[in-house]
Image (cartoon, rainbow, N blue to C red):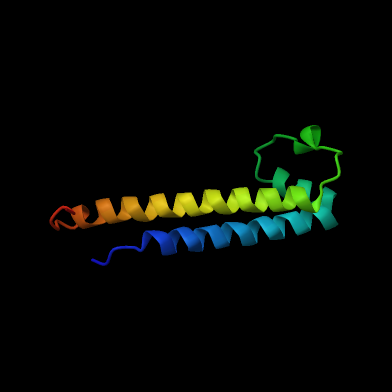
Amino acid sequence: MDKLNVWRIGAVLALTAAIINTVCAVAAYFDPEGFIAFVNSWSHGIDLNLIRSEKAWTVGDFLVGLVAVSLTGFVSGAIFAACYNLIAPRARGAKPLA
């Protein structure tokens, strides 16, 4: 069984998170009401309009969020790959990793 490359999986998840974050930011910027309605459909009855901020966001806010979500994505992907590499060979009866 092939091992996953921890750095590559981390980078792919970081890029995926960055793309999703950017699409989300664009949607929230151009159609805030539609965006809230869309996200409300995920929240099982919680009205997110009640916590909506009226503060205008800036490009700096977007960039800080983009870096934060990308870093979180990278760490999550790296942890996933490391756990996979540790557990997957044992699940198929292979020798434990040294």
x, y percentage for residue 77? 45, 54
Residue at 66% across, 40% down: 43
x, y percentage for residue 79? 40, 49
Residue 15 lies left or right of residue 82; in this view the side is right
Query: Which one is in front, 40 or 77?
Result: 77
Query: Which one is in front, 63 or 76?
Result: 63
Query: Which one is in front, 52 or 75?
Result: 75
Q: How many marks?
A: 0
Residue at 77% across, 57% down: 27
x, y percentage for residue 88? 26, 56
Residue at 55% across, 51% down: 71
Residue 53, quarter of the rendered image: top right
x, y percentage for residue 47? 75, 35
Q: Is residue 38 above or below residue 8?
A: above
Residue 37 lies left or right of residue 74; in this view the side is right
Q: Quadrant of the N terminus?
A: bottom left
Residue at 75% across, 37% down: 48
Q: Looking at this rendering, what residue extends furthest in the bottom direction?
A: 2
